[in-house]
Image (spheres, rainbow, N blue to C red):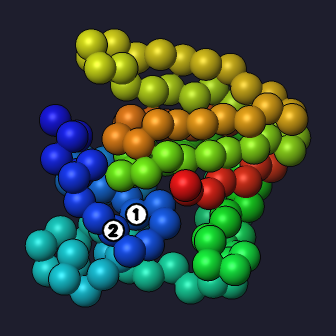
Amino acid sequence: DNHDILNCIFPEDGRLVGTDAIFTSSPNVTPQFPIDAESNTHKRLDIPTPSIYTDERGEIHNIKANDKRINILYTKKGYLRSGDLHPNEQCDFIFSGKVKLWTLQSDGSTKITDYCAHDFISIPRGVPHVFEFVEDTVMAEWWE
């Protein structure tokens, strides 16, 4: 049940929460806070802003605008990103390319929605989600 996390208050945007299976499924997920590293070595540590993370899937540019963290992602066709959920709404904007957004519904089913260039995406808080990149894609993500 992902509702427990919704009652928590996190000081940062877009903190990853999830099971060990989610955290161990991606090599770019590392601890966010030292205390989390002690209890779950798979959570992210602070992501410096600005910074660029690069792997075989593409790039994530982490920036800050005022007090908001914004990620600009370039992801190659055929890869997945996310596999997480957040205690706050996640917003995404597709600049170019196409993605399929897989979301876990409250009844346990999976909903798959297609998005393309110039689409805005709003993922409600606590909803597990995965992006499947159907084309090379440039997108932005931030948290409200």
Residue 43 in view = yes
- Quadrant of image for the C terminus: bottom right
Q: Amino acid at mark 2?
A: Phe
At 41% from the left and 42% from the top, the residue drawn is 125
Residue 54 in view = no
**Contact, CB < 8 Å: mark 2 with mark 1?**
yes
In screen coordinates, is 103 left or right of 71? left
Gap between marks 2 and 1, in whole Å? 7 Å
Q: Circle 1 sits on which residue?
A: 15
In screen coordinates, is 35 left or right of 13? left
Q: Please name whichever residue, 52 or 5, is drawn nearer the observer in this view of the structure.
A: 5
In screen coordinates, is 15 left or right of 69? left
Q: Circle 2 sits on which residue?
A: 10
Residue 77: image location, x then y, percent: 73, 38
> So how many labels did they put on this image?
2
In screen coordinates, is 11 left or right of 61? left
At 51% from the left and 79% from the top, the residue drawn is 47
Q: Amino acid at mark 1?
A: Arg
